[in-house]
Image (cartoon, helix red, strand yellow):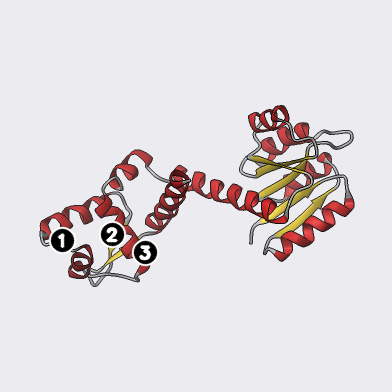
């Protein structure tokens, strides 16, 4: 379950946001100030921090810098009642993933959170891959189809893959399977059936996200 830290000096807003996010399946924690948020982040890991821009004593921008230092993997979404281009650009330059302005709709908030989580997942996946080689392995649509086929099945024999691809030249299929094996995206089990690896699953997740971004 993804963990979200809600940072705002408005106790009522924190409570409302917490209720909404719990209803959406997230685990939540609250902080009434930037200082408290940094203290909590120092001892606990959060996937997302919803951070109010305008808070007394320590501003949201100052808190953002500290949160990024303490928990660089935490995605920070700024909340502001003063949605200006300058505020948004400043926050994003200093490490925020996105911003949302008050008053906001629940679905807008949830969409922003899902997008930040998706981006984080993509970045983590990319870091674990040999990006150049992996992208080159997936440049061919046949190999992308093989990856998707194996992800949808527990395992597949060579002839099953060949039939699904509709390719009569078996040598071509062997070539594409070898490319995917060398990239560590698929492997063969004891029965010599082909299965997708954990790295292959992560790569497919990244590929889906990339394709979604390119199609929008």
Answer whether residue 55 is visible to the viewer in this image: yes
Q: From mark 2 to mark 1, how far is it between C-alphas? A: 12 Å
Q: CA distance from mark 3 to mark 2?
A: 9 Å
Residue that numbered label 1 is attached to = 167
Q: Residues within 10 Å of mark 1 (few under 14, many from 20)?
A: few
Mark 2 vs mark 1: give the one in front. 1
- SS for dot 3: helix
Q: Which residue is mark 2?
A: 146
- Give the left or right position of residue 165, taking residue 150 as reference: left
Residue named by callout 3:
151
Disc on the earlier residue, 3 or 2: 2
Q: Residues within 10 Å of mark 3 (few under 14, many from 20)?
A: some
Compared to residue 167, the image places residue 98 above or below, namely above
What residue is rendered at 73% in x and 52% in y?
A: 105
Distance from label 1 to label 3 (Cα)? 20 Å
* Residue 176 screen position, x and y as percent: 21, 53
Instruction: Check contact, mark 1 vs mark 3: CB within 8 A.
Output: no
Q: Where does residue 66 sit, x and y in percent of width and height?
A: 73, 35
Kindly state the secondary structure of the residue where label 1 is placed: loop
Position of 158 relative to 110 (above/below): below
Q: Quadrant of the N terminus?
A: bottom right
Q: Residue at x 64, y 45 (%)?
A: 74
Front-most of residues 41 and 83: 83
Q: Position of residue 215 (x, y in %)?
A: 44, 47
Of marks 1 and 3, the one in the foreground? 1
In this rendered view, identify the residue nearer to me: 138 or 74.
138
Quadrant assignment, res 195: bottom left
What x and y, as percent, mark residue 41?
73, 46
């Amino acid at each position: 379950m993804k963990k979200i830290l809600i940072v705002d000096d408005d106790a009522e807003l924190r409570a409302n946001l917490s209720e909404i996010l719990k209803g959406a399946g997230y685990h939540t924690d609250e902080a009434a100030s930037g200082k408290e948020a940094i203290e909590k982040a120092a001892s606990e890991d959060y996937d997302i921090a919803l951070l109010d821009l305008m808070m007394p004593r320590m501003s949201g921008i100052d808190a953002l810098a500290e949160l990024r230092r303490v928990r660089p993997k935490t995605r920070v979404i700024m909340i502001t009642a003063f949605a200006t281009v300058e505020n948004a650009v400043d926050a994003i330059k200093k490490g925020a993933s996105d911003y949302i302005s008050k008053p906001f709709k629940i679905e807008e908030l949830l969409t922003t959170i899902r997008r930040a989580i998706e981006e984080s997942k993509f970045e983590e996946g990319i870091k674990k891959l040999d990006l150049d080689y992996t992208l080159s392995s997936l440049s061919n649509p046949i190999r992308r189809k093989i990856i998707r086929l194996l992800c949808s099945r527990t395992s597949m024999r060579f002839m099953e893959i060949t039939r699904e691809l509709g390719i009569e030249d078996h040598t071509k299929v062997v070539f594409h399977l070898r490319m995917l094996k060398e990239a560590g995206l698929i492997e063969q089990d004891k029965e010599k059936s082909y299965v997708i690896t954990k790295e292959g699953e992560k790569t497919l997740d990244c590929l889906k996200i990339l394709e979604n971004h390119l199609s929008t």
